[in-house]
Amino acid sequence: MIRNVIIIAVVAVSVIAATRFFRTNGEEETQQMYQLLTVESRDIVVAASAAGTVEPIRTIEVKSKASGEIFELHVETGDEVRSGRLLVRVDPRVPQATLRQAQADLELAEAQLENAQAQLRRAEGLFETQSITEEEYDNTRLAVASANAQLVRAQRSVADAEIAAEDTDVRAPDDGVIIQKNVEVGTVISSATREVGGGTILLQMANLDTVQVRTLVDETDIGKVREGLNVTILVDAYPNRPFDGNVLRIEPQATVAQNVTMFPVLIRIPNSDGLLRPGMNAEVEVHVGAKYGAVAVPNAALRTDGDDVVSAAEALGFDPEEVVERIANQRAGREGNGQATVDESSSESRTVTMMGRSVTVPEDVDMEDARALEAALQDASDMRAVMGTLSEAQRNTMRSIMGGMGRGGGAGQGANASSTDAALRGGTYTVFALRGGFAEPVSVETGLTDLDYSEVISGLQVGDTVLVLPSSSLLASQQQMQERLNRMRGGMPGISRR
């Protein structure tokens, strides 16, 4: 038992970071734990990260209209080719023999037509002198027409044979790079136009001047992404060489893998240097928003209205009612100066902190579920890892809450704000800052946040000192631990209560 008491005492002492007396109604109160941090000017960059694979925008499968054996192969994988360049030559002997036969048939048809026309001319003279009958004259005219039709058929056969002979030379349909070769010299291939199966794929080529990355973005980030946003891409082959691109398209249909919902996003990347190649693994950062040189406060110092502010006030020895009144007066003063404020009466009882922002929980979401989700996310240092541990019910709760973020919360939130702005805008919070050496509650309005720091729009300035206290749940657990320790002190001999 004594050993357990010592362990609990050590744990209780280890969580106390620093102490100081605070002023409340002119009196000095009990010592409490806190951490002092200075408000600084810093860059706040928000990016949605994902992984993907480099791929061509358009891949062309090169096939042959001719069938037979590959006689010549003029390219290798990786070769850059121009439109019209000879790539493959198929055995031309049969098409060339067919062409020669067609040309001979054409010569015969031409001779037959000339002979029929000569006979017609003689028949016309004989018919005028009544030397032949009308039937014989008509037969001569019919022979001319038949010879003419035969000539046309022969001409068509020659044209078809010439095309078939030309088809034995497979040429590049467009500019690009050979990315795959499926045949070698001696391979027997089938025709793409005559075979039911579509013929043999000889080569694959693509234009790599511009490539794309197909990536999957988590549904919790997809609301921040829109077409046209700038993107930074890194590949393992060039770790110190970032590539710039932009969001081309967001697919409407999600994919679900291991209970994680993701949305395919296509990133377009100029590749004039040809450094990016199909199949490379890429790390993608979509530049959702950025504020450079912003007045920034740690998110850990922000307290949401309701129980969070009350617990912090009690931990610091303040009268919670007085703190609430001070904050209300500060916000009323800003409102009188034309600054936007939050309607506390409508949102105080249904407000939680979600993804670093104060959010009003929709009426159709149970507050117990919302509070449980808030506790799961509140002290997370790696938000993406925590998201992977949430149950499907918790993820559904988050979707409902995040979907309602535009219904109330932060200052300066217009009804016509875009979905991206709605996902990035901040809110109204309370911080405890040092004023004249004493802690005072201060209402602040925040803007862009990267989940670690938030841009301060009003309420603080660079150089101010703010207090970072544990979360309300941690304070409650510490209070329970202290009460348990006090009870154990009172019941153990040799340990006096203070």
Image: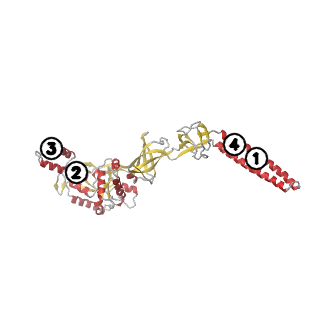
Residue at label 1?
109
Query: In the rendered structure, are the residues bearing label 4 and label 1 in contact, judged by CB atoms less than 8 Å apart?
Result: no
For label 1, the crowd category at 10 Å Cα-Cα, with few meaning under 14, some 14 to 19 and many 20 or more, is many
Residue at label 3?
2
For label 3, the crowd category at 10 Å Cα-Cα, with few meaning under 14, some 14 to 19 and many 20 or more, is few
Residue at label 4?
99
Measured in 3D between alpha carbons, the distance from the residue under mark 3 to the one under mark 2, in whole angstroms, is 22 Å
Amino acid marked by disc 3: Ile
Dot 2 or dot 4: first in sequence order is: 4
Query: In the rendered structure, are the residues bearing label 1 and label 2 in contact, judged by CB atoms less than 8 Å apart?
Result: no
Residue at label 2?
477
Q: Which is more foreground, mark 1 or mark 2? A: 1
Dot 3 or dot 2: first in sequence order is: 3
Residue 483 numbered tag: none
User: Taking 481 as reference, is 25 above or below it?
Assistant: below
Query: In the rendered structure, are the residues bearing label 4 and label 3 in contact, judged by CB atoms less than 8 Å apart?
Result: no
What secondary structure is found at the residue carrying circle 1?
A: helix
Dot 1 or dot 2: first in sequence order is: 1
Measured in 3D between alpha carbons, the distance from the residue under mark 1 to the one under mark 2, in whole angstroms, is 105 Å
State the residue at coordinates (65%, 44%). Answer: 164
Q: Is residue 394 left or right of residue 266?
A: left
The answer to which image quadrant residue 494 occupies is top left
Amino acid marked by disc 1: Ala
State the residue at coordinates (22%, 46%). Answer: 15
**Residue 249 at x, y = what percent?**
46, 52
- What colouring style does the render use? secondary structure
